[in-house]
Amino acid sequence: MDVLFDIADLKRVKGPLHLAIGVFDGLHLGHQAVINRAKASARETGGTALVVTFDPHPVEILSPRNAPRLLTAPAHKLHLLERLFGIDTVLVVPFDSDFASRTGEEFVASLLDSAPPEGLSRICVGESWQFGKGRSGDTDLLRTLGGRHGFSVSGIETVEVNGMRVSSTRIREAVGAGDFAIAKELLGRDYTVYGTVIEGRKLGRTIGFPTANMNPHREQLPPTGVYLVVATGSGDGWNGVANLGYRPTVEGGKMKRLLEVHLFGLDHEIYGEDLEIQFVEFLRPEMKFAGVVELKEQIAKDVEEAKRKLFSE
């Protein structure tokens, strides 16, 4: 995948350009409709379908106290765009106070100025999307500018599934409540978190259950507890058991929540690698045990239960 970090770099992309523009946190069914329209446009008339997104999430700059947990942190978003949606080129626009001060018309002008010689063919967005300082940009502005500068505009209406409006907020609520079925309906895929394996205290290996400690990069997590999970990374995949919580038996519950996964059959170190974790099923709440021996016994039961569920399906 070719990842650009400056609008000026659009000049080196083979045109004409068919842009899907948005924050795209979650890459849910609504986002997919926008991206698929850009891809279809490129197939129909030639050129390159390109996703334009922003980092950090604009709310982190405009209203930090209201910034949401992410459904897809930047690395996760790029991973999914390439693996699931076949996108070859992405422009990640740095969203800072300077960029936030641009009007909607100035943003579009920067796209036009940086387009390759073949030009800008189409912009695809959500119909209700607003952008630019003071929300000065919307689909009406895009259509006006498109008529003036020769590009088409596709405004995609809000997608609904079984009477539910598809939105990142609704998916965050579902994941936060542990409702993976609703999240999957709205995403069009299983909900996953994406994180880097970091070094921990290595207690797990001393009791026969080595774990990979995860840094999920501020992504939305389900409720505290023990889960059956599926993990993928570096071309490999594993089933496993994850503990999401405060580890009260060994830490006394006096720290932030941690995600640690015991992966069945993993026989090598993966520190520094990225893993994508799918929460398949809730197994039990997190509990405090009298000591490490009881903890070890319970983990053995969790592993046995997880394997029973895996192999009985």
Image (cartoon, grey):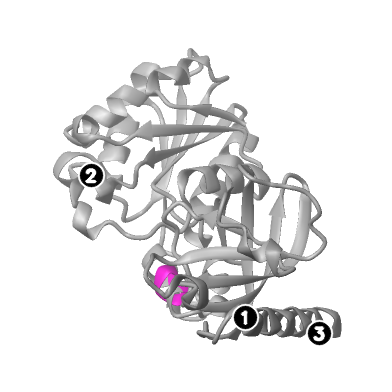
The amino acid beneath tag 3 is Arg
The residue identified by callout 1 is 295
Q: Residue 38 at x, y = what percent?
A: 53, 41
Does the segment drawn in magenta span residue 170?
A: no
Q: Earlier in the sequence, mark 3 or mark 2?
A: 2
The residue identified by callout 2 is 61
* Residue visible at 39% across and 47% down in the picture: 23
**Label 3: few (<14), some or many (≥20) within 10 Å?**
few
Which residue occupies the foreground of this view, 59 or 52? 59
Distance from disc 1 to disc 3, alpha carbons, whole Å, reads 20 Å
**Label 2: few (<14), some or many (≥20) within 10 Å?**
some
Q: Is residue 282 visible?
A: no
The amino acid beneath tag 1 is Leu
* Disc nearest the viewer among 1 and 3: 1
The residue identified by callout 3 is 308
Question: Taking 272 as reference, is 1 above or below it?
Answer: above
* Residue visible at 23% across and 31% down in the picture: 105
* Residue visible at 57% across and 72% down in the picture: 243
Q: Which quarter of the figure has residue 264?
A: bottom right
Distance from disc 2 to disc 1, alpha carbons, whole Å, reads 43 Å
Magenta part of the protein: which range? 171-175
Q: Residue 80 at x, y = what percent?
A: 60, 49
